[in-house]
Image: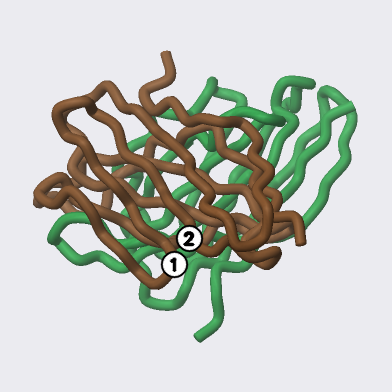
Amino acid sequence: EAGVTQFPSHSVIEKGQTVTLRCDPISGHDNLYWYRRVMGKEIKFLLHFVKESKQDESGMPNNRFLAERTGGTYSTLKVQPAELEDSGVYFCASSPWTGNANYGYTFGSGTRLTVV
Amino acid sequence: QQQVKQSPQSLIVQKGGISIINCAYENTAFDYFPWYQQFPGKGPALLIAIRPDVSEKKEGRFTISFNKSAKQFSLHIMDSQPGDSATYFCAASNGGLQGAQKLVFGQGTRLTINP
């Protein structure tokens, strides 16, 4: 089965520009998550979709970040306008809906975003 | 406020030795404790996980030890091999019966196994 696909793998943009990251989860996985790791820090939760609905967006840093999951398939994370502190690796992960406790996520390889 | 604290930040072990990484958590509602392994250029991959109703779980050379009263858990890698060189993350969540929940990660440990 295909894994979680993220693109681009790298993005370098200037402060104030807009960037859109995309995530294609494993087919049939209802849960989709976005996480971010800033250099040397822990991986931090951003938000969680169940199908096309936002289940938890408590980790979104501010309103410059907008996540969508149209049709419950792929998801996009847009940063507009980008700031220097947005630099980091953005991971997407997916998992099946089990209705019962936790199962391991499958992570994508991440998008390394550098804002200069 | 960091809810899961991981140590050490980096670790060098000789081939064949035992690698030990420790994590401590604060939220007593956590009920799922996975460890993830990440190689350069790849995303984290689930290695092994434990629930608080057991004190130890072993899968091959990898063992999780869990101390509920101390709110600590650790990863032991026996007979460490150069191929184990990677970054390891501990994590925790409280999924309960509501399905998949967000993970709270530790800061990561960069493990190097010298041949």
**Chain of the residue under the numbered disc 1 shown in the image:** B
Q: Which residue is located at x 37 percent, y 42 percent?
A: B74
Number of on-image labels? 2
Name the residue type under label 2: Met
Separation (CA) of disc 2 from disc 1 = 5 Å
Q: Position of residue B103 (x, y in %)?
A: 37, 42
Co-location on one chain, circles 2 and 1: yes
Chain shaded green: A
Q: Which residue is mark 1?
A: B61
Q: Which residue is located at x 70 percent, y 27 percent?
A: A86
Question: Looking at this view, is B40 or A22 the one in front?
Answer: B40
Question: Looking at this view, is A81 or B50 the one in front?
Answer: B50
Q: Left or right: where does residue A55 sit relative to residue A35?
A: left
Q: Left or right: where does residue B83 sit relative to residue B6?
A: right
Residue A8 seen from this side: no
Q: Compared with residue B62, is residue B89 higher up or lower down, i.e. above or below? A: above
- Callout 2 touching callout 1 (CB < 8 Å): yes
Q: Image quadrant for the N terminus of chain B?
A: top left
Mark number, residue B11: none
Can you tell which quarter of the image residue B12 is in?
A: top right
Q: Kindly state the secondary structure of the residue where label 2 is placed.
A: loop
Name the residue type under label 1: Arg
Q: Which residue is located at x 85 percent, y 24 percent?
A: A15
Question: Looking at this view, is A29 or B100 the one in front?
Answer: B100
Q: Left or right: where does residue B19 sit relative to residue B41?
A: left
Q: Compared with residue B80, is residue A81 higher up or lower down, i.e. above or below? A: above
Q: Colour of chain B?
A: brown
Q: Which residue is located at x 23 percent, y 25 percent?
A: B27
Q: Compared with residue B39, is residue A78 higher up or lower down, i.e. above or below? A: above
Q: Which residue is mark 2?
A: B78
